[in-house]
Image (cartoon, grey):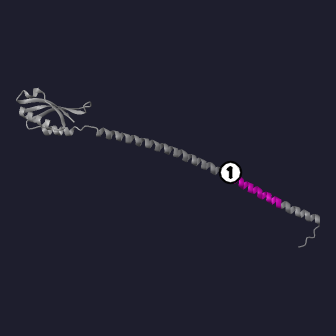
């Protein structure tokens, strides 16, 4: 196609085309700026939400770490208590084996009226006070011999008043046991 327009009009057409091109580019640039601004706003909202989430996680982890710290402290206290209880029971003197040995030593004709046991911390022995009634002095003598032969009794103390009566003897004695 041949353009037969004068030069002045050709320039005007060329300027209009360039003006239209510039206007189109400006519109495209404004659209780009609008979407870029919108994207930046969206990114700002997104990162604010992420900061909020991380703060919540941080506070939650802080709460969890405090909970774990408290739990560890409680477990340590419980272990210390168990250790103290174990040490308490391992250092205890058991009374029932001594009581069994005393009851095994009693012969026919001897009855028990009272039995008292205390732990002497200074000497670290169990003091046992026993009172009862023996039908005959010989029964009481047999009891004394059995108790003295027992290796678990450190000392067997029979007062002299026990040996006065030959029959129906009311007796008392004291044992020191390991």
Q: Residue furthest bottom?
A: 1
Is residue 22 found inside the magenta-colored segment of the image?
Answer: yes
- Give me the residue at 64% from left, 50% from top: 45
Q: Percent x, y for residue 61?
A: 52, 46
Q: Nearer the viewer, residue 32 or 118?
A: 118
* Element type where label 1 sits in the image: helix
- Give me the residue at 82% from left, 58% from top: 23
In this picture, residue 48 sits left or right of residue 153: right
In this picture, residue 113 sits left or right of residue 53: left
Q: Hey, which quadrant is residue 72 in on the image?
A: top left
- What segment is highlighted magenta in the picture? 21-41
Q: Please identify the quadrant where the N terminus is shown.
A: bottom right
Q: Percent x, y for residue 122?
A: 26, 30
How many numbered tags mark residues here? 1
Camera sees residue 136:
no
- Give me the residue at 66% from left, 50% from top: 44
29 over 137 or under it: above or below: below
Q: Nearer the viewer, residue 46 or 127?
A: 127
Q: Please identify the quadrant where the C terminus is shown.
A: top left
Q: Percent x, y for residue 133?
A: 10, 31
Q: Hey, which quadrant is residue 81 in on the image?
A: top left
Q: Residue furthest left?
A: 166
In this picture, residue 12 sits left or right of residue 44: right
- Give me the residue at 18% from left, 36% from top: 153
User: Mark 1 Cα within 10 Å, few/some/many (few <14, many 20+)?
Assistant: few
Q: Which residue is mark 1?
A: 41
Q: Hey, which quadrant is residue 113 in on the image?
A: top left
Camera sees residue 16:
yes
Q: Percent x, y for residue 149?
A: 13, 37
Is residue 40 found inside the magenta-colored segment of the image?
Answer: yes
What secondary structure predominates along the stretch shown in magenta?
A: helix
């Amino acid at each position: 196609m041949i353009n037969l327009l004068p030069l002045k009009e050709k320039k005007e057409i060329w300027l209009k085309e360039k003006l239209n091109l510039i206007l189109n580019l400006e519109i495209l640039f404004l659209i780009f700026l609008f979407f870029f601004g919108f994207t930046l706003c969206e990114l700002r909202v997104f990162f604010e939400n992420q900061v909020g989430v991380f703060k919540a996680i941080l506070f939650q982890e802080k709460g969890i770490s405090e909970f774990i710290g408290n739990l560890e402290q409680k477990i340590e206290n419980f272990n210390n208590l168990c250790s103290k209880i174990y040490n308490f029971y391992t250092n205890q003197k058991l009374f029932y084996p001594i009581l069994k040995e005393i009851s095994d030593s009693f012969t026919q004709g001897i009855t028990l009226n009272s039995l008292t046991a205390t732990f002497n911390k200074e000497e670290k022995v169990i003091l046992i006070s026993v009172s009862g009634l023996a039908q005959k002095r010989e029964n009481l003598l047999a009891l004394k011999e059995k108790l003295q032969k027992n290796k678990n009794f450190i000392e067997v103390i029979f007062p002299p008043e026990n040996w006065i009566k030959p029959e129906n003897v009311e007796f008392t004695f004291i044992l020191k046991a390991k």
